[in-house]
Amino acid sequence: MGLFVRFARFIHAGGVSFGVVEGEAGVGRAGLTIAQIDSLPFEAVRFTGQRWALADVRLLAPIFSSKVIGIGRNYADHAAELGNDVPKEPLIFIKPSTTVIGPNDAIRLPPQSHQVEHEAELAVVIGATGARRVDRAGAERAIFGYTCGNDVTARDLQRGDPTWTRAKGFDSFCPLGPWIVTDLDVSDVEVRCEVGRDPEKMEVRQIGRTKDMVFDVPTLVSYVSHIMTLLPGDVILTGTPAGVSEIVTGDTVTVSVQGIGELSNPVVTLD
């Protein structure tokens, strides 16, 4: 569509649809509307003419992915806080598609872990052409847009396991949202995480800027594409800045990325 666009996936009386979020950015959801489209976001956009106040619909994770690829230790300060060296090439792992939840869905703490932590991240969404063995220019063309992500991690399990699959792979361990923003310059945007029980008294746990990533976004997309084909809707989590810490039942975790919006999720104990 050529300009800044916010695509969301939502539930309404007629079912589940994609739509374009309309209204001035930064004014809060109360002043926004969502216009239904009858296509996937990265296809030719066709509006149906149906429109709702954003407050009257339930937002879902903005995309369904065949896979979510995480990037470890992509901020030097985060690597340092966990006592790790900065990797010489991107350190990747996979989060199952079943980890993905949307805005206001609950992060469910599993009984196997006693130390679950938040990781606020910029998330990259791959577009219709996908990506296989692309260079930087091809990587930039393959990117459809960006959203907020939370790479929830069972830190105690991560320390004890030889791989990160269990620590990163529990259901609900990948909140995404609230929408996908296209045509955004993410070379230097703020990534923030706040945690608390009172919306008026949230504690800032993480503040970082994407300019401090060890490997930038085109480098990450190109690197991953030389290992696995990236399909439309796939997501790459680009790493988290320092400040990761434990979340417990009753908390709300809010991840925000400058230019995109806020992603909030309550924390509950898995029954």
Image: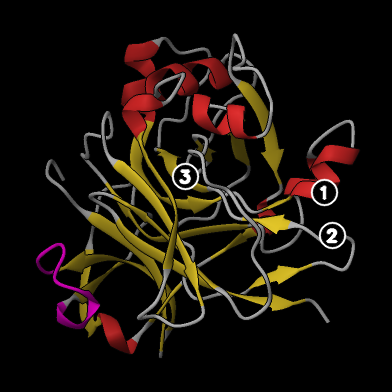
- The mark that comes first in sequence, 3 or 1, is 3
Q: Mark 2 points at which residue?
A: 113
Q: What stretch is highlighted in magenta?
A: 23-31
Q: Position of residue 15 (x, y in %)?
A: 46, 82
Q: Residue at x 24, y 76 (%)?
A: 29
Residue located beneath label 3 in the image: 121
- Asked if disc 2 and disc 3 are in contact, CB closer than 8 Å, the reply is no
- Measure how far apart labels 1 and 2 are at the Cα level: 7 Å
Q: In the rendered image of this protein, does residue 179 appear above or below residue 88?
A: below
Placement of the N terminus among the 4 image quadrants = top left
Residue 85 visible (yes or no): yes
Q: Earlier in the sequence, mark 2 or mark 3?
A: 2
Badge 3: residue crowd in 10 Å (few <14, some 14–19, many ≥20): many
Pick the front one: 52 or 27 = 27
Residue at image mark 1: 156
Q: Which of marks 1 and 2 is nearer the N terminus?
A: 2
Quarter-of-image position of residue 141:
top left
| Mark 2 surroundings within 10 Å by alpha-carbon count, few (fewer than 14), some (14 through 19), many (20 or more) | some
**Secondary element at tag 2:** loop
Question: Does residue 174 appear to the left or right of 156 in the view shown?
Answer: left
Q: Where is residue 14 in the image (x, y as percent from the top left)?
A: 41, 86
1 and 2 marks in contact (CB < 8 Å): yes
> Where 218 sits versus 28, above or below?
above
Marks 2/3: CA–CA distance = 22 Å
Residue at point 40%, 21% (across, down) = 216
Q: On the picture, is 157 further left or further right than 62?
A: right
Measured from the top left, where is residue 32 in percent x and y?
Answer: 18, 76
Kindly state the secondary structure of the residue where label 3 is placed.
Answer: strand
What amino acid type should be assigned to the residue bearing mark 3?
Glu
Tell me residue 92's x, y (percent): 65, 27
